Amino acid sequence: MRLNFPPAPSYYAATGSEPARAGRAMLKGEFTADVGIIGGGIAGCSAALHLAQRGYRVALLEARFVGYGASGRSGGQTIFGLAASQKTLIAQVGRDAARRLFDLSIEALDLTQSLIREHGIDCDYRPNHVHVATKPRHLQELDEWLHELHHDYGYESARLLNRDELRAHVRSERYLGGIIDPRSGHLHPLKYTQGLARAAEACGVCIFENTQALGYEDGTLVLVRTAQGTVRCRHLVLCGNAYLGPVAPVLARRILGVGTYIIATEPMEAARARALLPSNAAIADINWILDYFRLSADHRLLFGGRVSYSAFEPPHLAESLQRRMVRVLPETQDLKVQYAWGGYLDITMSRAPDFGRLAPNVYYTQGFSGHGMSLTGLAGKLVAEALAGTAERFDVFARLPHRDFPGGPLLRRPSLVLAMLYYRLRDML
């Protein structure tokens, strides 16, 4: 996939637990491992960690640096469920499998917190996430959603907030109510990814940065080619998602890289930050083109909202997002924006994640569709289970059907841009 805009410096890169640049060695020459992994995001680092804990010798190849892609740039919100609705999942794989997928998404939340505790990852984790309504029909949607969560999935953690109750979490007149979930939360995504990488290295994983995989040859031993070296391995795991490019064209056709963008304000006084978001919860509305925001550990407002399906960065990005921020929280109009950045998340046609095998010893995970902050960590664990011989949980995801985006290389983006116009108009109603 060709990426048409360069990454701007992010708040996360400026405040990560290690410099956001390639600091590890580049692969040179031949390296032999039990498992090769392509992609140094959360999924790749989690797979490496869990495989190393099982005794496998692992080599992880990252084209830039650990956390370069979506794992280190996202909104940092850890949320229950999948990007695809449960109704969509039921239609695809049946009610029982859809329930298992939901339960696995809850396990993903617990795994995130477990990994943070077990490996001492300082990533500013905070509990609570609130989905908010911006119009009356959203209130009905939230009520129906909560009934489904409680009665169909036994998920009692989430609860409904009326407009007055919501003010204990966000001081905005724009919102009419919400669903709060204390098991969901938010964190510094780059610090978390970097922490997983260090934990994997402590277990013996070899991570090579500035090492782009150019392709691979499958067989009993898989050969992965890079510019200055090769990895020979018994198993290969592809975790490059939207950044995997030509390494696996059959996978690239099933996902589309969508640009998403965030701004970070200057720091506020702690009291002012608490006045805006009293419970320090992460907030997201339920529009198709949604706004989402939260506080950083140093009392900045991190606000995301714009998306680009065209593969080009929208003009006047910081100004546009700041206008959206002020519309939601008018008290922020005097705050200066100090960081504005973007990146690609990988979406599938159904918005359900795409796990599977390209050969008996070549596994992949992709297509988290903006809902991967915790699910990517679980994906890595499930890959490790499957590779070690227990594939039942991995195959719950692998059963989900996926198809190519229509239109081929030239028309797939224009077709999607036209389709998204419908959802933008729906958001206005």
Image: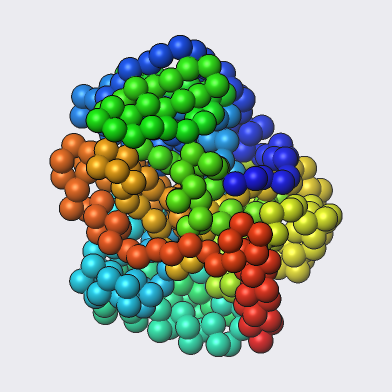
Q: Which residue: 49% across, 39% down?
A: 247
Can residue 179 be seen at all in this image of the molecule? yes
Q: Quadrant of residue 388?
A: top left
Could you say where residue 172 lies in the image, as x and y percent from the top left? 66, 70
Could you say where residue 191 lies in the image, as x and y percent from the top left? 51, 34
| Left or right: 408 as drawn, with respect to 301 | left
Seen from the viewer's position, the closer of residues 365 and 13 is 365
Could you say where residue 17 lies in the image, as x and y percent from the top left? 54, 28
Can residue 290 be seen at all in this image of the molecule? no
* Quadrant, the C terminus: bottom right
Position of residue 151 relative to residue 358, above or below, is below
Could you say where residue 350 lies in the image, as x and y percent from the top left? 45, 68
Q: Which residue: 29% across, 53% down?
A: 107
Q: Quadrant of residue 288?
A: bottom right
Instruction: Give the residue furthest to the left.
Output: 389
Seen from the viewer's position, the closer of residues 246 and 79 is 246
Scheme of colours in the image: rainbow
Instruction: Give the residue furthest to the top.
Output: 29
| Left or right: 43 as drawn, with respect to 13 | left
| Left or right: 320 as drawn, with respect to 427 | right
Seen from the viewer's position, the closer of residues 426 and 220 is 220
Q: How many marks?
A: 0
Q: Which residue: 52% across, 31% down?
A: 214
Q: Which residue: 73% across, 45% down?
A: 5
Position of residue 46 relative to residue 199, above or below, is below
